[in-house]
């Protein structure tokens, strides 16, 4: 089932939106993450996408208590600073459905492959793309892998992928369709798309090319996109 998924990005105990992932470029802020999550669920969200931005920047998870509360409300996928498999397992114990791995997916391939074999269907590999290359460590460093090259290291396992185009993240300017289509159609496993989604047509395009869902942040928080309209695409034939 195709899913329209609201993003809840946590920084210093608040929900924020950042422009292109830059730590000091906050475009939206809300003080009560639990209330934000509750509102998305009440409005029909089946899945929530929670990123611990403080964790991503500092290299370790910082918002476990908030994440545990949100995980009680809906299906949840969590990422940000998860660079230790014991932390990932603790998140599973807290009720998190999928854990998103970014930096580890590049730096510790064999270890993550073994972890994914143990936790089938619960590992999500982040494919964070900056100018066609994979970005790691809170999007601060770029490596030589392309998004598809990274994903192919895991595509034979029971995992899912999160493709984020950093070049358009947080700009509410639309998506780069060719790059999305290339990634989705190159891989066997489910691919969720994030970054720049700002219209119903962007969502429909992602569904049409075979994405498993879209993660939307800034367009919802700035009210450029109405969630009630966006979620209807889950049930449309496109």
Image (tube, rainbow, N blue to C red):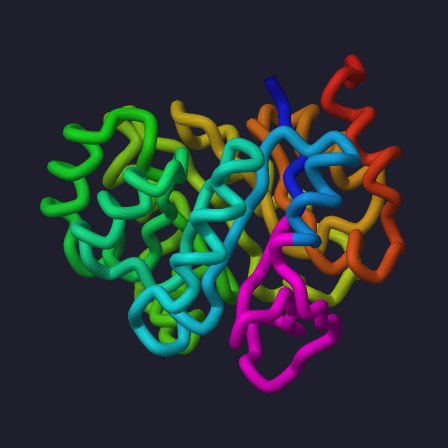
Q: Nearer the viewer, residue 85 or 116?
A: 85
Residue at 30% across, 58% down:
82
The residue located at (78%, 61%) in the rendering is 172
Tally of marks: 0
> Does the stretch in magenta take in 35?
no
Residue sitting at the far bottom: 24
197 and 224: which is toward the camera:
224
Q: Position of residue 201 (x, y in %)?
A: 83, 37
* Front-most of residues 21 and 51: 51
Indicate left or right for 182 with 41 as reference. left
Picture quadrant of residue 205: top right
Residue 92 found in image quarter: top left
Q: Is residue 16 left or right of residue 228?
A: left
Image position, residue 153 (x, y; %): 24, 40
**Residue 133 to residue 44: above or below:** below
Which residue: 26% across, 36% down? 154
Looking at the rendered image, the quarter that the N terminus falls into is: top right
Residue 11 to residue 213: above or below: below
What's drawn in magenta, residue-wise?
7-34
Residue 32 visible from this viewpoint: yes
Give the quarter of the figure containing the C terminus.
top right
Horizontal relation, residue 182 to residue 201: left or right = left
Q: Say which quarter of the image contains residue 30.
A: bottom right
């Amino acid at each position: 089932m195709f899913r329209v998924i609201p993003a809840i990005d946590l920084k210093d105990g608040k929900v924020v939106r950042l422009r292109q992932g830059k730590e000091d470029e906050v475009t939206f802020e809300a003080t009560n993450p639990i209330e934000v999550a509750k509102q998305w669920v009440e409005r029909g969200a089946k899945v929530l996408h929670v990123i611990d931005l403080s964790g991503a920047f500092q290299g370790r998870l910082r918002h476990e208590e908030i994440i545990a509360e949100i995980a009680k409300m809906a299906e949840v996928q969590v990422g940000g600073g998860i660079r230790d498999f014991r932390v990932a397992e603790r998140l599973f114990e807290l009720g998190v459905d999928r854990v998103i791995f970014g930096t580890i997916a590049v730096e510790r391939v064999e270890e993550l492959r073994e972890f994914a074999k143990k936790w089938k269907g619960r590992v999500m590999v982040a494919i964070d793309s900056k100018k066609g290359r994979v970005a790691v460590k809170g999007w601060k460093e770029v490596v030589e892998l392309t998004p598809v090259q990274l994903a192919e290291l895991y595509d034979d396992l029971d995992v899912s992928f999160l493709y984020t185009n950093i070049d358009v993240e947080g700009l509410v300017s639309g998506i780069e369709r060719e790059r999305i289509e290339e990634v989705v159609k190159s891989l066997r496993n489910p691919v969720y798309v994030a970054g720049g989604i700002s219209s119903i047509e962007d969502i429909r395009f992602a569904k049409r090319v075979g994405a498993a869902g879209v993660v939307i942040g800034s367009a919802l928080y700035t009210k450029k996109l109405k969630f009630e309209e966006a979620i209807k695409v889950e049930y449309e034939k496109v």
